[in-house]
Structure formats: C-alpha cells, structure tokens
Image: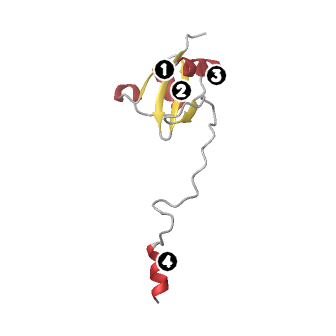
Amino acid sequence: MPRLKAFQAHLGFFDTVVAAPSQKAALQAWGSRQNLFRDGGAKPATDPDAIAAALAKPGIVLKRLAGSNDPFSEQPPLRAARNEKRGARKGKKSRSSLLSTRS
C-alpha cells in the first residue's frame, strides 16, 4: 500500500483537502489539468484536523467553505443567503418607488 500524504488547495468557493500518494494523484483527484503546486494554488496540508479528515477517506476530495473553520466533508452545507437587499436602508424609499409615485 503506498504511503499517503495530505494535500490542500483553494478551489472556487471551497478549501479542499485530499489524501493521495503523490502530487500527481492529488491533481487527478481534484480534476485539475494544470500543476496547482507550481502555481502555489496547492500545497502539502499543515492543519492536523484537515490531515486527519483526509487520511480517514483517502482519494476523496473533502471540502469546506473557504475561510471557515467548519470540518471538512464530501458535501459541505452551504450557508443561507440573507433576505435583505444590498444597500437598502431602514426608513428610506428606493429610487424606483419614488419614480413610480411621480406619475
């Protein structure tokens, strides 16, 4: 059985970790056609929790939302979006509502 190493990369909205025998195998697991290690997008994992999670499920890409401290999982839960409109202020009417009252 080959010796496994844990590798991490930031891909899209997720921080990912995978246990693989080599960098090439990790790139294949991520589905990458470019060398993320050369570009600095991927590196050997240093977080003990990430390493433990990856070694528990070798060859499977585990994810968590970027920048979070959530545990790594195969299908991380997405956080609910806010229902508020951006830029809306309390007590202020929107420009579109002001224009509709002028006619």
The amino acid sitting under disc 3 is Lys
The amino acid sitting under disc 1 is Ala
Instruction: Report the disc number at residue 45.
Output: 1
* Callout 3 secondary element: loop
Point out residue 50 in the picture as x, y percentages from the top left corner.
55, 22
Residue 1 to residue 89: above or below: above
Residue that numbered label 4 is attached to: 97
Image quadrant assignment for residue 43: top left
Residue that numbered label 3 is attached to: 57
Q: Is residue 78 left or right of residue 44?
A: right
Whether pointer 2 and pointer 1 mark residues with C-beta atoms closer than 8 Å, the reply is yes
* Callout 4 secondary element: helix
Please report the residue visible at 52 percent of the width from the left and 30 percent of the height from the top.
16
For marks 3 and 4, give the one nearer the viewer: 4
Circle 4 Cα neighbour tier, 10 Å, few/some/many (<14 / 14–19 / ≥20): few
Q: What is the distance, in whole Å, between disc 4 and disc 1 at their CAs?
A: 52 Å
For marks 1 and 3, give the one nearer the viewer: 1
Whether pointer 4 and pointer 2 mark residues with C-beta atoms closer than 8 Å, the reply is no
Point out residue 13 in the picture as x, y percentages from the top left corner.
50, 41
* Callout 1 secondary element: loop
Which label's residue is closer to the chain start, 3 or 4? 3
Q: What is the distance, in whole Å, between disc 2 and disc 1 at their CAs?
A: 7 Å
Which label's residue is closer to the chain start, 2 or 1? 2
Which label's residue is closer to the chain start, 4 or 1? 1
Residue that numbered label 2 is attached to: 17
Residue 32 to residue 96: above or below: above
For marks 4 and 1, give the one nearer the viewer: 4
Which label's residue is closer to the chain start, 3 or 2? 2
The amino acid sitting under disc 2 is Val
The amino acid sitting under disc 4 is Ser
Which quarter of the image is occupied by the N terminus?
top right
Point out residue 22 in the picture as x, y percentages from the top left corner.
49, 17
